[in-house]
Image: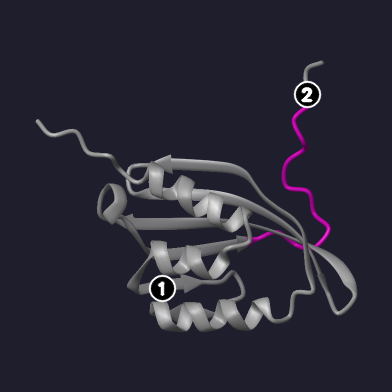
Amino acid sequence: MELTMGIRAQVEALVRDVKAGRFVEAIEANYADDASSHESTGIETLGKPALLAKERNFLTTVEKWNVIEATSVLVDGHMAAIHWKFELTRAGRRITLEEVALQRWNGEGANARIVQEQYFAFPPGSTPMPEAKKAG
């Protein structure tokens, strides 16, 4: 029986790219050509070219990334959930965005790609989970 690698390494690579501010590169490397993205606002984006265009457009509005954090990452089979926290400056204002990206991946190991992604955004100013207390 052949042991499969699953998607864990690809999810970890995606998180590393995003945390390093390599958003476009993360899409190029990890999304299928026919991937779809669904925002909690109802906006649907179909295909990697459209996803890349949307991301590039959004990035032009960001003056500074203050925080890029994956607070939780869960992988189960070909599904992943990433709880993202972003603090960024736009139009001179520092804002916080928090969302969970639920991803369905196809393929195994280095060949795995996101085919569908659904975002669940938290309302501005909400705190979905208290920070874990650090032992000390």
33 vs 2, left or right, is: right
Q: Mark 2 Cα within 10 Å, few/some/many (few <14, many 20+)?
A: few
Magenta region:
121-134
Q: Position of residue 3 (x, y in %)?
A: 19, 33
Q: Quadrant of residue 31?
A: bottom left
- Quadrant containing the C terminus is top right
Q: Position of residue 114 (x, y in %)?
A: 38, 61
Q: Mark 1 Cα within 10 Å, few/some/many (few <14, many 20+)?
A: many
Query: What residue sits 53% from the left and 70% below the top?
Result: 24
Query: What residue sits 44% from the left and 49% below the top?
Result: 11
Query: What residue sits 59% from the left and 61% below the top?
Result: 120
109 vs 96, left or right, is: left
49 vs 136, left or right, is: left
- Quadrant containing the N terminus is top left
From the viewer's perspective, is residue 98 above or below residue 31?
above
Residue underneath mark 1: 36
Callout 1, which amino acid? Ser
- Residue 134's disc number: 2
Q: Secondary structure at mark 2?
A: loop
Q: Is 48 inside the magenta-drawn segment?
A: no
